Image (cartoon, rainbow, N blue to C red):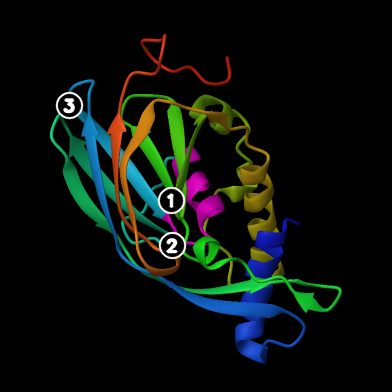
Amino acid sequence: MSVRTSVFVALIGLNLSGCIGTGHVRSLAPEVELGARSTIGDVTVDVLCADFYGEPESFVAHASQALLSQARSYDWKRLAVGSTVTRTTCRKEDRYIGFPPIVLVPTAPSAETAKSRGVFVHVAGERTLYRLRLNGKSARIEATSLDEAERRFPGQLNGPEPAVLSPEWSQRTQLRSDYYSSTSWSPSNRIAITQLETGPEGAILSVTMEIRLPSNSSLERIGE
């Protein structure tokens, strides 16, 4: 079980029974103003701003083509993007972040990490999903193949979500995390961050991205 997933499962129980045996920190990630423009003509773009523990669920929603307008773990926006900047916002998140103590010394995440943002971007009609990792003043853009994601998709993740804290829920949470963590991502220049504004403790306040043709290619191909 990955550290982030095990902490996520444990935190729900800790919220019910106290915080004995683990460290925790509360952090408010403020609303983010998000802008996008395109240098390749008019495109429709899906943007998912994932919650701190919501990246696996956000990825599964894309891979299964089951995006929800009122999702628990991500904020989904569909944008019509052209040569001028289209703007929207990603919701704020009041985060309760757990972390395991190592040799009885809690290893808390940095303030920048606690306020970091993960954003998934998909251009309509294409078979590549992009992941933006925004941490303080740094930004990492990666891509993966949706064809490969669909090929590997575990059938057990279909169907209604089990009751929280049930054995079936824990099993599904673990399976979703394993599926996401086993996905291969490659650096991408298809999306460029042209503006990134941060506030106190590295909180992401505003980000603008530009959708481009990747270098030396008419279309980016991942996993071939």
* CA distance for labels 2 and 3: 33 Å
- Residue 42 disc label: 3
Provide the residue span drawn in magenta: 50-64
Tag 1 or tag 3, which sits nearer the N-term?
Answer: 3
- Residue 137 disc label: 1
Rendered location of residue 34, percent (x, y): 27, 50
* Residue that carries the numbered disc 2 in the rendered image: 202
Q: Give the SS element for disc 3.
A: loop
Rendered location of residue 110, percent (x, y): 58, 66
Name the residue rendered at 43%, 51% in the picture: 137
Tag 2 or tag 1, which sits nearer the N-term?
Answer: 1
Q: Is residue 112 above or below residue 145?
A: below
- Seen from the viewer's position, the closer of residues 146 and 167 is 146
Q: Are marks 2 and 3 in contact (CB under 8 Å)?
A: no
Viewport quadrant of the N terminus: bottom right
Rendered location of residue 109, percent (x, y): 62, 66
* CA distance for labels 3 and 1: 29 Å
Q: Are marks 1 and 2 in contact (CB under 8 Å)?
A: yes
Q: Disc 1 marks which amino acid?
A: Lys
Q: Disc 3 marks which amino acid?
A: Asp
